[in-house]
Every structure is written in C-alpha cells, then in structure tokens.
Image (cartoon, rainbow, N blue to C red):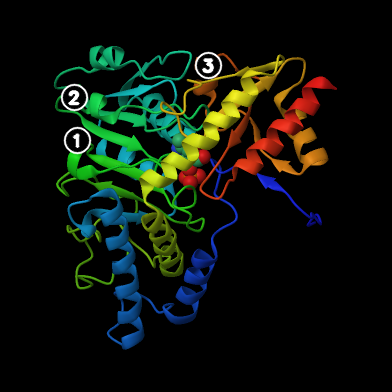
Amino acid sequence: MERNRRHFIYMDHAATSFPKPREVIEGVAEGLRNFSANPGRSGHFLSLDASRTLFEARETVARLFGALDSRQVIFTRNVTEALNLAIYGVLEQGDHVVTTSMEHNSVMRPLRDLVSRGIIQLTVVPSSKEGVAEIAGLAEAVRPEQTKLIVVNHASNVTGTLVDLKLVSQIKGEALLLVDAAQSAGCVSIDLSSLDVDLLAFTGHKALLGPQGTGGLILKTGQEPVRPLIRGGTGSHSEFEAQPEFLPDKLESGTPNVAGFHGLAAGIGLIQEEGVEAVRDHEKRLTATLLEGLSQMDRVHIYGPRDPERQTAVVSINVDGMSSSEVGFQLDRNFDICVRTGLHCAPAAHRTIGSFPQGTVRISMGMSTTMGDVEEVLEALKWLVSH
Ligand SMILES: Cc1ncc(COP(=O)(O)O)c(C=O)c1O
C-alpha cells in the first residue's frame, strides 16, 4: 500500500536512481506510443521507426562510452544479464579467471557456478579493508596462457571504492578484462577509446537515469570471442536456422525493449547536457559533506576510503549498538529517509571490509540529491545516535 508522504529523502541511488527524470518518463511513454512496432522485423514504416529509435539509443550509448561502433553495444535487460553474457559467453573448459573480493553476486554467482561444475579455476584476490583492489595481487594471480578473463567492478556497490581501470589493464596480459560498471556508468567518466577494457557491462537504471529493464555489454573491438547466451529471432538472415555471426544480432535475440532504451537515451541525454564530470563533481561535494558530518558522530563507524576522490557517492556505515536493519527502519519510519541495509548482494565485499554477516547501512546519492538532503540525513543520524 502506498504511504502518503509529504516529503521524503531518497538515499538509495546505488540500488536504482529515483525519481526518474520527466524526460525519461516521457521518453518511455513516447516509445510506447509511437515506436512500439517490432524493429528489424517488418518493412513497414512503423517497424522502420522502431529500428531507427533503437539505433539512435545504441548510438547514444556508444558516444557516452567512446565505443568504436554502436554495433558493438549489445542491449540486455540489466548489467546482470550483460555480465552473464560475458562470463558464460567467453569461458571454456580449463580457463582460469581472476577477480577481486569486492564483487557483486552478479559476478560471483556465475563464476561460482562454473567452478562448481569443474569448468573454470578461479582466483579471488583479496582487496584492502577499504575495498581497494590490490593491483600487485591481481598481477601475481594472472597466469600466462591460462587466465582467460579478469573481472573487476569499477566502483563497489558497498563502499563506492573506485578501481583504477588503467592500472588493471596494464597487468591483464593476454586475458580479457571485463568491467562491471553498474555503479560508475553515468557518474564517473568511462572512455573506451583510451582504456584497454575489452568488455564493459552497464545497467541503465542507476546513474544513467533510465528505466529498469535496460542495460548492455560493450565489446571494445567487436572481435572478442563472446558466444550468445540466448539464440532466436533477430529479424536478420531469417532464411538460416543458425544464429547470425554479426553484431549486435549475434548476441541479441527476441523483441527488444524499444521504449525502455528510448527512455534510457533520454536519461543519457540529460547526463551529457550536464557533463559526466559535472555530475561527478556534484557527487564529490555531497560525499565530502556526508563523510565530514559522519566522522563527527562518536557511535558511527564509516567503511571504505572516506575520500570523495577515491569513491563514488556511496557511503556505508554502522551505528554502535544497533543493527543495520534497525537503523534503516528508524530512518524510514521516523524521518522518511530511504537507505539500503544488509549485505547488498555482495557478501564477499562485506567479508573484506569486516561487516559480514550484519551488513551495513548504505547511504547512496545521485545527480538529483541536494546538499539539503545530506544535511537532513546527518540531522536524523545525529538524533538516532544520541537517543
Ligand atoms: C556492482 C553491481 N553489479 C551488479 C549489479 C546488478 O545490477 P542489475 O540488478 O541492474 O543487474 C549491481 C546492482 O546493484 C551492482 O551494484
């Protein structure tokens, strides 16, 4: 049942951005209204309009991330599907994979599945207590001729800790580098033209401001050996029962979410108007204020780097003497503040930072968060720790 709230503060942008901008809502509505024919499937003008809409969304994504060619942007339902596509699509019997102890279950569960079936060997390199990937440890773990894939998240969904992708790419050798950009796409600049990242997985509904049900995998050269996760109708080469070999059709089957990707393009348009660097600066200022206020509260323990330069606008805390869920409940019930508590689908990350199994209270901010919101959260926490 909907609660009637005069005013609320949304601090759960790492889960999904909210509220969605008017332009995104209108983009989805316009997509449903005008472009809901099946793209690439028929020759009539409505189908062509839908194809053009999807193509424009693909171009918008390609431009944002500096992709070589928009055909190398594979649309998926979310980053989970993109990561599964990359992991199951690349790995074969006998391959070795290197990853970090800060990964989300969207990475760990597919990898653990392949390990449990005896298909791959996996090395999970410990990160520091602040969630910082140990580059020397990653370099040591890479086995020449056997390591097929290195998987790292660009920013942790638990502590916001950023990974230096340039450094990781320097140690990857012949392995493919797969980056989970769920927490960075849209709020940290990513330029594939100057980064040696082979596979970039993103989700549309977080800092890219798009609707849920949108995401993708970008192939740096288009030559990466990725097998399809699903096969089926593409509208192309219908005379053959074998999956087409060209992108994006090779890796994208079934009727796509045209309206959703039209809305995502509108979200990306807003970010480009503002500039990713400006979004990042705004979020750094919010993070600095939040960290400063939290550091003055005796009973509050802050996890992660505690440095806006080294993290996104995600801050995990615990309050002495209270469980994370109790803090979250009090913030919601008494102050109409939405945060996420618990393990955030990343148990390994909580083991790394020392908050397993109780988890943390995660305060995560976005483009629409104001300094006033941060101040209200600090006031609420001040009240909580003193009562
Ligand atoms: C680092 C990271 N990876 C993967 C995911 C999964 O995202 P989605 O549910 O959009 O697939 C998330 C979302 O919370 C995340 O933060």
Give amino acid for label 1: Asp
Q: CA distance from mark 3 to mark 1?
A: 28 Å
Q: Furthest-bottom residue in view?
A: 44
Examine the image and state in which quarter residue 43 appears: bottom left
Q: Is residue 72 above or below residue 9?
A: below
- Circle 3 is placed at which residue position? 353
Dot 3 or dot 2: first in sequence order is 2
* Quadrant (top left, top right, bottom left, bottom right) of the N terminus: bottom right
The CB of the residue at mark 1 lies under 8 Å from ligand 1: no
Is disc 1 in contact with disc 2, using a CB cutoff of under 8 Å? Answer: yes
Q: Is 337 positioned to the left or the right of 138 in the image?
A: right
Location of residue 361 in the rendering, given as x and y in whole percent from the top left corner: 65, 28
Depth check: give the residue in front, 374 or 249: 374
Q: Is 360 positioned to the left or the right of 108 in the image?
A: right
Secondary structure of residue under mark 1: loop
Q: Is residue 240 above or below residue 348?
A: below
Q: Which residue lies at the image location 22% right of the left edge and 59% below the top edge?
A: 71
- Circle 2 is placed at which residue position? 170
Q: Which residue lies at the image location 43% right of the left edge and 46% below the top edge?
A: 279
Give amino acid for label 3: Ile
Dot 1 or dot 2: first in sequence order is 2
Which mark identifies residue 196? 1
Location of residue 65 in the rendering, given as x and y in whole percent from the top left corner: 28, 49
Examine the image and state in which quarter residue 347 appears: top right
Q: Which residue lies at the image location 37% right of the left edge and 25% below the top edge?
A: 115
Taking the image as drawn, is residue 196 in sight? Answer: yes
Secondary structure of residue under mark 3: helix
Q: CA distance from mark 1 to mark 2?
A: 8 Å
Local packing at callout 2 (Cα closer than 10 Å; few below 14, some 14-19, many 20+) is: few
